[in-house]
Image (cartoon, rainbow, N blue to C red):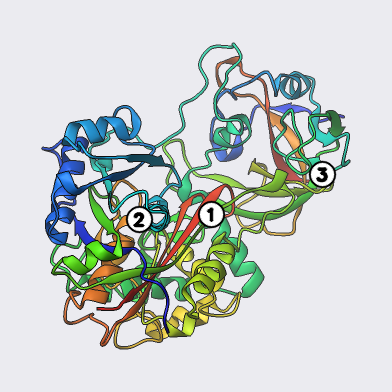
Amino acid sequence: MSEQQTQHAAFGRPIPAPPVSLETEEFWKRARDGRFAIKRCVSCQEAFWYPRAICPLCHSSETAWEDSPGTGTVYTYSIVRTFPTGPFAIGFVTLDEGPLVLTNFVDFAEGDLAIGKRVKVRFVATDNDGPPAPVFGPA
Amino acid sequence: MSRPPRACIAGAFEHPLRDAPNATTTQLHYEVARGALDDAGLGFDDVDAYFCDGAVPGFGPLSMIDYMGLSNVRHADATELGGSTYIGHVGRAASLIAAGKCKVALITLAGRPRQRKEALMFAPAKGSGLTDGAPEAGFEHIYGGITVALYAAAAMRHMYAYGTTSEQLAWVKVAASHHAQWNERAFLRKLVTIEDVLKSRLISDPLHLLDCCVVTDGGGALVVVAPEVARSLKRPVIQVIGTAEAPGVQSGGRNVDLTRSAATITGPAAFAEAGVKPADIKYASIYDSFTITVLIQLEDLGFCEKGHGGRFVADGGLISGVGKLPVNTDGGGLCNNHPDNRGGMTKMIEAVRQLRGEAHPKVQVPNCDLALAHGTGGILGMRHSAATAILERTG
């Protein structure tokens, strides 16, 4: 894992501090170390998103964290033009492990963001000293 | 076709206001209840089942029932399916009636989103402690996942997958405006052109301002009754012949297709129960939170092949008297009314008007005896809901 933290939020949009729960504490602890984690089911072996204590595919309560390279392709996106803090890009990435992930896209020039583009995770600081949040930019 | 008598819609009422600074939300619930009961020729004491959504003021249905003085209710229900809730309510009420649990079900919706000054945004986490809220919040809300952005992302994928164009999406709005020009209560009555839609400002690529529904105060109500009650009233008999509801879920991010909705489940189920097919439907109310919503639902319900929605709606395909399928002849959520950001109620109401022959003469479908109402609640392609109701005039 070598994702460096950048201070540049998506199209200048500040990301609020994520709510952290008992089920997601480990995700955000790893995020502070620049590690992007996903959950995989010990029983059915499938990776899933968003992270939670149980597997939504086979309903097992045995699930494990694993570090992911955070690589995937853009499934779809939109650029929100009318937002109080300025335009930003939002959309979904299909991770190479399979799950579809909602995220913000960063470091794309206007017009370069497209469905099918390869992307890789990076972390951006969040408001109020919250843990850094994963976003995706050009691979 | 012969089938046992089914629950009937005896009363329907759309609140005349689109901007309601001078009444509480609870008052609006009362006003629409009174309107729908008057329409049916029934009174508050006849009501033995009450349905509302999960966002009503106070303690679920209890506050509403107590406020209105409904003293004979034996079934109280707060359902939260988002904007499709009220179409789902009709199916639930029909099931209760079929089971002999009630005879007169009242369904109300009211809200005043125009009076809220703050933007509709998710509240940020406060402090550094652990939270115990929506399980997905840390992975979705922080990214600014506002409703329009996610429907826009669905539209982008639909364009990518099927070659759908902004012009085709614009036809949905143009059709709505053709209908709204005759509706004196419509929030937007101006006839618009494809060019008007495409030249309106981009809100969230590829959706323009005129691809988005209106924000209105107000509400509506329905009265669903047992068949013997319907026969005793002076109104036309509108039977509920097929209903279905289904949540659409993400399956751990492993089975998400933003170009499809849970209408792929509710459409076939409702048509099977009704014993009719899409080609038999003479009028359809299709939830139009955004233009893309209509396209995807028409495909999923089987009115056209998947991916052909753009061609189906183009060239006036949804305009009454012009196109293949008259849709949202009140002007829909895009032009007429979208009370409390929840479109299912007004979809049912216009379907009832059409079946009674009470739509505006300029948009009334001739001999309209079979209609469908469908809604998508929540966020299309993520966790959302679908609800379908097929109605037939039998007397």
Q: Residue at x 52, y 76 (%)?
A: B309
Distance in Å between CA atoms under marks 3 and 2: 39 Å
Q: Residue at x 53, y 54 (%)?
A: B380
Residue B390, by quadrant, is: bottom left
Residue underneath mark 2: B343
Same chain shared by disc 3 and disc 2: no
Q: Position of residue B181 (x, y in %)?
A: 19, 73
Q: Is residue B308 left or right of residue A86?
A: right
Binning the other alpha carbons within 10 Å of mark 3 as few (below 14), some (14 to 19) or many (20 upward) gives: some
* Parent chain of label 3: A
Residue underneath mark 3: A71
Q: Position of residue B205 (x, y in %)?
A: 51, 57
Residue underneath mark 1: B380
* Parent chain of label 1: B
The kind of secondary structure element at disc 1 is: loop
Residue B19 in view of the camera: no
